[in-house]
Image (cartoon, grey):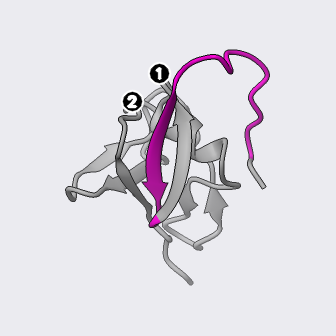
Amino acid sequence: MALLKRLAEGDRPAVNFTLDGVPASGLLGDTLLTAVLTCSDHLRGSDFSAEPRAGFCLMGACQDCWVRLGDGRRVRACSTLLEDGQDISREPGRSV
């Protein structure tokens, strides 16, 4: 179940991407964080307990929204725009 629900702006063009190898879609202009959380219940696992995380500050100031792109880059999901065909991998976090 998705964590975020769209209430407006549903008329923007769709942008296809993969999330952990599974096809997904967001909307043109979405950040990675918005795109992921409108199709999933978490953004990544905690670095300390592997518990699900959804980001923290949502403006690029903290370190809580890192995801990895298909080319190996690690980016902040809250400040990186979704691009068509992107391959996004969530970090599972660390089990204690």
How many numbered marks does the figure carry? 2
Q: Which residues are magenta?
A: 3-21
- Residue drawn at point x = 65 percent, y = 48 percent: 39
Q: Is residue 20 above or below residue 76?
A: below
Which numbered tag is attached to residue 61? none
Does 53 sit left or right of 22 as displayed?
right
Q: Is residue 62 above or below residue 27?
A: below
**Looking at the rendering, which quadrant does residue 34 occupy?**
top right
Residue 74 is situated, as x and y percent measured from the top left of the image, at 28, 52
| Amino acid on which disc 2 is placed | Leu
Q: Is residue 66 above or below residue 26?
A: below
Towards the viewer: 46 or 73 = 73
Q: Counting residues from the N terminus, which is met first, the one under dot 2 or under dot 1?
A: 1
For label 2, the residue is 81
Answer few, some or many: residues within 10 Å of disc 1's Cα (few below 14, many 20 plus, some between 14 and 19). Answer: some
Residue 28 is situated, as x and y percent measured from the top left of the image, at 48, 24
- Residue drawn at point x = 66 percent, y = 41 percent: 38
Residue 26 is situated, as x and y percent measured from the top left of the image, at 55, 36
Q: Is residue 73 magenta?
A: no
Q: Main secondary structure of the magenta part?
A: loop
Towards the viewer: 26 or 57 = 26
For label 1, the residue is 29
